[in-house]
Image (cartoon, helix red, strand yellow):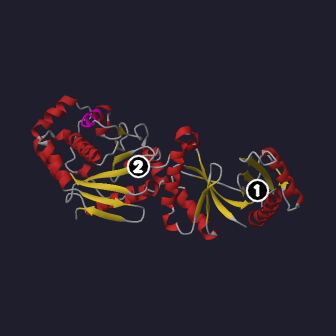
Amino acid sequence: MEMVISIGYGEIALKKGNRNFFVKLLRDRIKDALITYKDEIVLYEDRSKFYIETKEENLNPIVERLKRVFGIVTIHIAYRVDKDLDAIEDMAVKIMKLKLENSKTKTFKVTGKRADKKFPMNSMEIAKHIGGVVLKADLGYSVDVHNPETYLNIEIRNYAYLWFTKEHGAGGLPVGSNGKALLLLSGGIDSPVAGYMVAKRGVKISGIHFHSYPFTSDRAEEKVLNLAKIVARYNGMIKIFSVNLLDIQKEIHEKCPEDEMTLLSRRMMMRLAEKIALREKYNALITGESLGQVASQTIQGLDVTNATVDMPVFRPLIGMDKTEIMDIAKKIDTFETSILPFEDCCTVFLPKHPVTKPKRKRIEDSEEVLDIPKMLDEAIKNMKVYKVNSEEIKCIKGE
């Protein structure tokens, strides 16, 4: 029996004039996700669906990889036969017999879908006819149209495909269909989730990480790079810019009010992120901020940090509570890495009583004593750059 993987996409099909662009991009993302199988698969299209031919032992591992490809809505392993009624009948009886032997189910329902309108039966007629064939085979099944234990699904395209159950894909849009953005990636729970959510809308993600070595350890940076590896399962290769913020933090600590330390540091992070984003031709910044979660994430605090940059800043978690964010982190497998107890740069010179309702003018006045352009240039000159995919981390700049 010939088995293939069926791949369905959702909102891409509604793109009308731009549909071909999205479909081609999704095809490329599927190939990227299955690069290690490139000599063992055949990827083809059949009336608005993708299908993969491969060895039977590859079917389940490939399905697991496809679940992480944005743009895919449904995935299932299907039995493929010629678009011939006798062939469909024979296959239906064979696989229903196997299903009975393996699962001991007793009730079933057939659903039909006719994408090829030249096929002589419509969708309801296909379901009714094949249901009758299965009953006549006397396998021990009965029909239950309301609550069946087994669904036998049949789709008529250039081939006929028969299948039982489907997996849900990641949904969204193919990565790269909506520009590029730079994620402020900390070692916490929130920012990897924020990156995942924006990538799901078709944005290609890179990351900038701030550390305070040697006040923070190499293990803290390693943790962030490992988080990037996990996000890369969905996004593809991620470039990580690793910037040491310690000299900037020391100068702010020496020259500026203590209670403004967190906000002033955050403003410097935003400036650095935008400077790198503009140089690398990214279209937006992404942060994991959630309104009211910490002192710098009040409305006033967000206004003060926003004031330092001109490019769009995406905050996909802004209205979510911590439990909702943690649920997504667990779903995408970043949670266990995020909770490893390695400190980040935000813990350095942390004020006892940080300002929560800052005034922009007062913050700007405090920055007058800082040589901001020089501080930014020095930090960028000394930063490390990594390329991270789901398998490896490679340093391409710095030691």
x%, y% of residue 277? 29, 46
Residue 136 seen: yes
Is residue 198 depicted above or below 386 in this figure?
Answer: above
The front one of 304 and 65 is: 65
Q: Which mark is residue 321?
A: none
- Among the two numbered marks 1 and 2 on one chain, the one whose residue lies closer to the N terminus: 1
Give the residue number, with chain letter if any, for mark 2: 204
| Image quadrant occupied by the C terminus | bottom left
Look at the image and give the residue range highlighted in magenta: 303-309
Give the residue number, with chain letter if any, for mark 1: 83
Is residue 342 depicted above or below 15 in this figure?
Answer: below
Q: Is residue 226 left or right of residue 379?
A: right
Judged from the image, the secondary structure of the residue bearing numbered disc 2 is strand
x%, y% of residue 218? 26, 63
Tell me which residue sits at (89%, 61%) in the image: 138
What distance separates the C-alpha of mark 1 from that of mark 2?
Answer: 40 Å
Check disc 1 and give the amino acid type: Lys
Is residue 240 depicted above or below 145 in this figure?
Answer: below
Q: Is residue 279 left or right of residue 335?
A: left
The front one of 68 and 361 is: 68
**Residue 282 falls in which quadrant of the image?**
top left
Q: Residues within 10 Å of mark 2 (few under 14, many from 20)?
A: many
